[in-house]
Image (cartoon, helix red, strand yellow):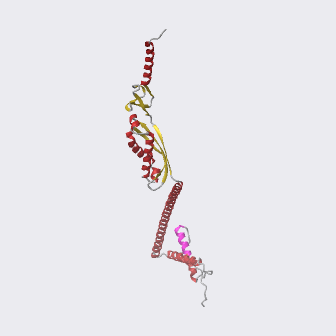
């Protein structure tokens, strides 16, 4: 059966239509945006899903990832304000917000973000001392994020986080910091020990003060008792009580003999002849004690009792 020209044209047209459909239909995956260029000029952005373009006139330009992405910042050396050299690395997180700006405002988006982050790390950390770098990492991260995000905003991206991972000082500087920390701890220990000794001395001084106060109080009471006893004896003497006089004299005499007897340079004690009167005084003391405690005794007078207690004298006889 011979084919006519119309029979050949129809299949060709069908094939052309299918080719045009396949060329004009574009599927964009989730999380991506495609830019459309017409004769090399940006016209629009294709969102995720099924999209149609003009075949052979429009073409897909840049395929931009709209999800949040991570970018490792390599290790670099930073000179701090106090001339310490430290090795620093980090990580940056960013997200493309406008596909057209990210595609056409900068060439090599990741490389631009990386160099911008590294430059600002050197600027920010170079204006701080080493102690501030080690103790204010959160403040450094916040400042870096603000600076880098402002610089990258014309590129249609959003810097979500900029984090410093490691700060590595030189080995000799680490040893110096360890010695400094040890010295600081020793200083604190010495201060605490000194405070403890101070408190102990204060408590000991307070104890001595309290003991001295108690001793003074005891001496005061003893003096009051001695004064009271002296007053009683004086009143008895004023009343003519011979026994009180004998008691007072015997007490002083006994104390004097005890002092003489306890002397270290005397081996022989010579008793005076008047020592016999001490025995009479002791007799008077016994009489006073019996009268004070209510004990019964002889009806003789105190003078007779003292006379009876006195031993007879020995001497030459008179004819």
Foreground residue among 240 and 49: 49
Foreground residue among 134 and 32: 32
193 sits left or right of 153 in the view: right
Give the overall secondary structure of the magenta segment: helix
Q: Is residue 225 above or below residue 259?
A: above
Q: Position of residue 289 (x, y in %)?
A: 54, 70
Whether residue 148 can be seen here: yes
First to last magenta residue range: 282-294
Whether residue 305 can be seen here: no
Residue 291 magenta: yes
Foreground residue among 142 and 296: 142
Q: Quadrant of the C terminus?
A: bottom right
Which residue reaches farthest right?
A: 267
Foreground residue among 67 and 227: 67
Q: Position of residue 38 (x, y in %)?
A: 38, 30
Q: Is residue 33 above or below residue 164?
A: above
**x 58%, y 83%: residue:** 273
167 sits left or right of 271 in the view: left
Q: Position of residue 259 (x, y in %)?
A: 56, 77
Q: Position of residue 113 (x, y in %)?
A: 43, 42
Badge count: 0
Which residue reaches farthest bottom?
A: 319
Name which quarter of the figure residue 238 lies in: bottom left
Q: Is residue 149 above or below residue 62?
A: below
298 sits left or right of 53 in the view: right
Residue 73 magenta: no
**x 43%, y 37%: residue:** 95
């Amino acid at each position: 059966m011979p084919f006519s020209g119309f029979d050949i044209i129809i299949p060709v047209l069908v094939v052309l239509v299918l080719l045009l459909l396949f060329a004009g239909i574009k599927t964009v995956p989730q999380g991506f945006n495609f830019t459309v260029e017409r004769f090399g000029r940006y016209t629009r952005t294709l969102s995720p899903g099924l999209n149609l373009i003009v075949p052979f006139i429009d073409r897909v330009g840049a395929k931009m990832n709209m999800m949040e992405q991570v970018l490792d910042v390599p290790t670099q050396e930073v000179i701090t304000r106090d001339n310490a050299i430290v090795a620093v690395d980090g990580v940056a997180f960013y997200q493309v917000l406008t596909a057209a700006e990210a595609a056409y405002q900068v060439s090599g988006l990741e490389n631009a973000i990386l160099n911008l982050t590294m430059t600002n790390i050197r600027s920010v950390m170079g204006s701080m001392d080493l102690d501030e770098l080690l103790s204010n990492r959160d403040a450094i991260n916040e400042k870096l994020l603000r600076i880098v995000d402002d610089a990258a905003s014309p590129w249609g991206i959003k810097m979500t986080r900029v984090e410093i991972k490691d700060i590595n000082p030189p080995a000799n500087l680490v040893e110096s910091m360890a010695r400094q920390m040890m010295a600081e701890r020793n200083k604190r220990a010495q201060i605490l020990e000194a405070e403890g000794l101070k408190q102990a001395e204060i408590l000991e001084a307070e104890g001595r003060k309290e003991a001295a106060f108690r001793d003074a109080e005891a001496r005061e009471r003893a003096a009051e008792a001695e004064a009271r006893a002296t007053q009683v004896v004086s009143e008895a003497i004023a009343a003519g009580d011979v026994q009180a006089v004998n008691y007072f004299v015997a007490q002083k005499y006994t104390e004097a003999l005890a002092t003489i007897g306890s002397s270290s340079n005397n081996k022989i004690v010579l008793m005076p002849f008047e020592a016999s009167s001490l025995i009479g005084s002791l007799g008077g003391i016994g009489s006073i004690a019996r009268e004070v405690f209510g004990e019964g005794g002889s009806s003789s007078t105190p003078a007779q009792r003292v006379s009876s207690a006195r031993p007879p004298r020995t001497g030459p006889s008179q004819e």
